[in-house]
Amino acid sequence: MKKAISIILLLYVVTTVFTACENSLTNDTSAQFHNAADAVGVLQSNITSKIAECESLLTSTKTEDVLDADVLKKLQTEIDAAKTLEIAIPAIAAESDTVKAQTAELEAKKAEMQSQLDALSHAANAIDDSKQALADKLEAEKQAKLDEAITLKGYHTATSEDSRGYKINATIKMTSWLKGSDYETLNRAWKKAGGSVDFPHLTEFRGGMNYKFDMNSAIFAIGTCEFTNVTGNGFDITAGNEHTPSISIIPGVMHEFMRDNTKEMRFTNGSSYYPKSFKMKTFFSGVYYDSGWKYHTGSSSVSAVKASMTTNRWGPVVFFIAYNDIFTPATPDGNPELDELLFACKVFESAFAGNFITKEFKIEKTW
């Protein structure tokens, strides 16, 4: 009797333990299924939101907004792929083995969906990267163009010879035209050319006559001038043998009114060396000496630099030339006459035999 009871108790314990283990296994399997199903549901919601976000990005982005248009095609491909994902969460089965199989399928689907979500994010980020790359490229091109604009270029030279045989060479370099409304660039160009003080903010121009001056409508070109005694043979310029050469900038020269005599360019037709259309434009210049600023105005020409040479080399000094009222309601893009306007530099001194002119040159626009 006791033996039978013992056997029954043993069977009960074994059955109880087995049932508990089976229930535990079933509960674990069920939990894994529900966790995977929940994760798939979250991913499904995230992908739906991401598709809408990517479609909006695609609609608002033009081909010219990006550096590489292929990133737009790539995002469309990933959107289409995300839309065709088959997403279905089955009802949990009763059998444990079937639940395990369902869970494995959900885990695989979860991995596929996460991969697609990552692909959408990557494709969208590629568009942002391409936009930034385009912006960086355009900014680099802008800065390169700006650097070119503010760089002194062209060696405009004239060698003068006075009645005693002294020869002085003038070398003038100029930047492109710069807008007066962009003071930062003006000041940068001025300093790059060698200016030791900040470029002036001009509201009035005192040079012979007083003029109201509007920086926003004006244009400027920065230049440098240097004089060198090239006489040679020991004929130096000294404090006791001082020379005072000057340069004036002549706006609107016309090639047909200038001639080449193999040494220099000279006037050949009095005051008719500038085009009639620009004749009445007031021309401005400014130069900074150790003693301070000197400003000048003119129409047919404007004095730019006056030197006091007590050695064989003087300068370079930095100067500017300017036109007011270039940007007006009538000419919002700038006076079109600038496109054909040519300049020359006149070198002279009272002791020289005549006015010596550089070859004509054009100052390019930067807008």
Image (cartoon, rainbow, N blue to C red):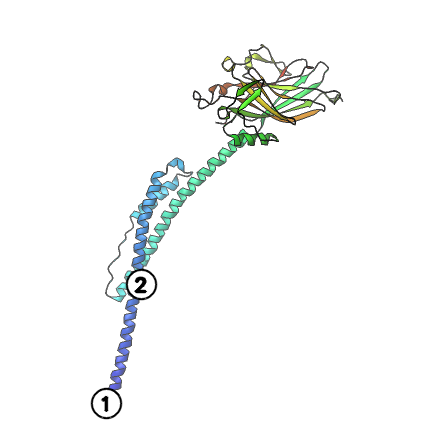
- CA neighbours of label 2 inside 10 A, class few (<14), some (14 to 19), many (20+): some
The residue singled out by tag 1 in the image is 1
Extreme-top residue of the structure = 269
Q: Is residue 206 above or below residue 57?
A: above
Along the line of sight, which residue is nearer the eye, 72 or 156?
156
Q: CA distance from mark 2 to mark 1?
A: 47 Å
Picture quadrant where residue 298 is located = top right
Residue 234, quarter of the rendered image: top right
Q: Pointer 2 and pointer 1: residues touching (CB < 8 Å)?
A: no
On screen, 334 above or below 87? above
| Residue type at the position of mark 2 | Gln
Q: Is residue 87 left or right of residue 135?
A: left
The image quadrant that residue 10 belongs to is bottom left
Residue located beneath label 2 in the image: 32
Which residue sits at x=26%, y=83%?
9
Picture coordinates of residue 308, whole percent (x, y)? 69, 22
Write the residue at 47% across / 20% down. 336
Foreground of the two, 315 or 167:
315
Residue 260 percent coordinates (x, y): 61, 14
Residue type at mark 1 is Met
Q: Is residue 236 above or below residue 82?
A: above
Tell me, yes or no, if residue 292 can be seen here: yes
The reply to whether residue 103 is visible in this rendering is no
Q: Position of residue 17 (x, y in %)?
A: 29, 76
Residue 206: % across, % down: 57, 21
Q: Earlier in the sequence, mark 2 or mark 1?
A: 1
> From the image, which quarter does the N terminus lie in?
bottom left
Label 1 neighbourhood size at 10 Å, few (<14), some (14-19), many (20+)? few
> Which element is circle 1 on?
loop
Secondary structure beneath disc 2? helix
Report the front residue among 353 and 88.
353
Q: Residue at x 32, y 58 (%)?
A: 107
